[in-house]
Amino acid sequence: MKIRWILPFLIVLLSSNNAFAMHIADGIISLQWSLLWFALVIPFIFLGIGKIKKLSESELFFKPLIGLLTALVFIISVMPIPVPIVGTCSHPTGVAVSSIILGPFVSVIVSAVALLFQALFLAHGGLTTLGANIFSMGVVGSFTSYAIFRLCRKMGLGIILAGFLAGIMADWTTYAATSFQLASGLAKEGEMLSLLWKISLAFVPTQLPLGIIEGGITAGALLLLYKRRKDILLKMNVLQEEGK
C-alpha cells in the first residue's frame, strides 16, 4: 500500500485526544443482545467476502478500490459528536459512497473493517457491540443507500441528486437502527416504544443536519469520480445505462 493511503489513518490516530463512546460502546447493551446482532451480521459478512473474491478475479483494480473506500469510510465515520444521555455519538457514516460504488454486500465488509479499527485503536464503539454497530451502519446504511440510489436512477434522476438522497438516507436510517438497538437492549418490559421515542428524539438535533452533510459528501464523491474517473463508475455499473 502506498504511503499516501496510510497517511490519513496516521493523521486521525495521532490527532485523536479524547476517546468518545462512538457508535454503541461496550456495556451499553446486554451480552444476549450483542450476540444476537453478531448472529444477524455473519451471513452478510460471508456473502460480502464471496463478492470480493469473485470481483477481484475479473477486475485487478477492485481490491485497491476497496482499500481506498475503507479509508474513506473510516475517516468520515471517525468524527464523533457526543449525544447526551444515550451513551453514543452522532457522526456521518460514509457507507453511501461505498455501497453505491462497490455494492451493499462489499460495503458491509468495508464498514466492518472501519468499525473494527475504530474499536481497537480509538475506543470508538466496542468489541462486544461490534455486531450491532456493523448491522446499523454496514447493513442498514449500505442497503438503504444502495436501494435509494438505484430507485432514484430508475426514476430518471442524475447521479448527483441520487447520491445526495442516498447519503441522507444512509445516515438517518443508520441512526434509526441504532435507536432501536439501544431501546431494545435497555428497555424494561413494556417500555420499549417509550424509550425508542426518547432516544430517537435525542439524535434529532445532530443527525438531521449531519444527514444533509453526508448527502453532500456522497454527491461530491460521485461528482469527483464522474469528472476524473468515469471509467470506474462504468465498470462498477454505477453508470450502466450511460455506459451502454
Image (cartoon, grey):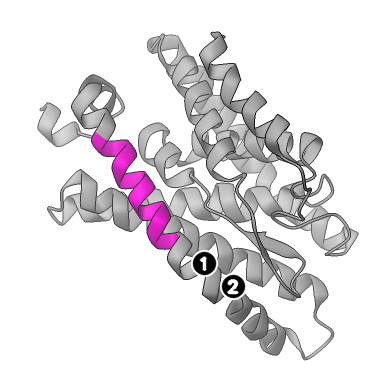
Query: Dot 2 corresponds to which residue?
Result: 203
Q: Is residue 210 left or right of residue 152?
A: right
- Residue 32 figure quarter: bottom right
Q: Is residue 180 above or below residue 56?
A: below
The N terminus - image quarter? top right
Residue 201 lies in quadrant: bottom right
190 or 128: which is nearer to us?
Answer: 128
The residue under the point 80% across, 36% down is: 120
Amino acid type of the residue tagged 2 in the rendering: Phe
Looking at the image, do the residues carrying marks 2 and 1 touch, with CB atoms under 8 Å apart? yes
**Which residues make up the magenta segment?**
211-223
> Is residue 122 left or right of 135 when viewed as pictured?
right
Queried whether the magenta region covers residue 229, the answer comes back as no
Q: Is residue 97 above or below residue 33?
A: above
> The disc labelled 1 sits on which kind of residue?
Gln
- Crowding at dot 2, Cα within 10 Å, few <14 / some 14-19 / many 20+, comes out as many
Identify the residue at horizontal 62%, vertical 44% (top origin).
78
Q: Quadrant of the C terminus?
A: top left
Find residue 230 and report its horizontal and vertical position in percent: 21, 24
Q: Is residue 166 left or right of residue 81?
A: left
Residue receiving disc 1: 207
| In the foreground, 203 or 11 | 11
The residue at the point 36 percent across, 54 percent down is 215
Instruction: For mark 1, give the secondary structure.
Output: helix
Q: CA distance from mark 2 to mark 1?
A: 6 Å
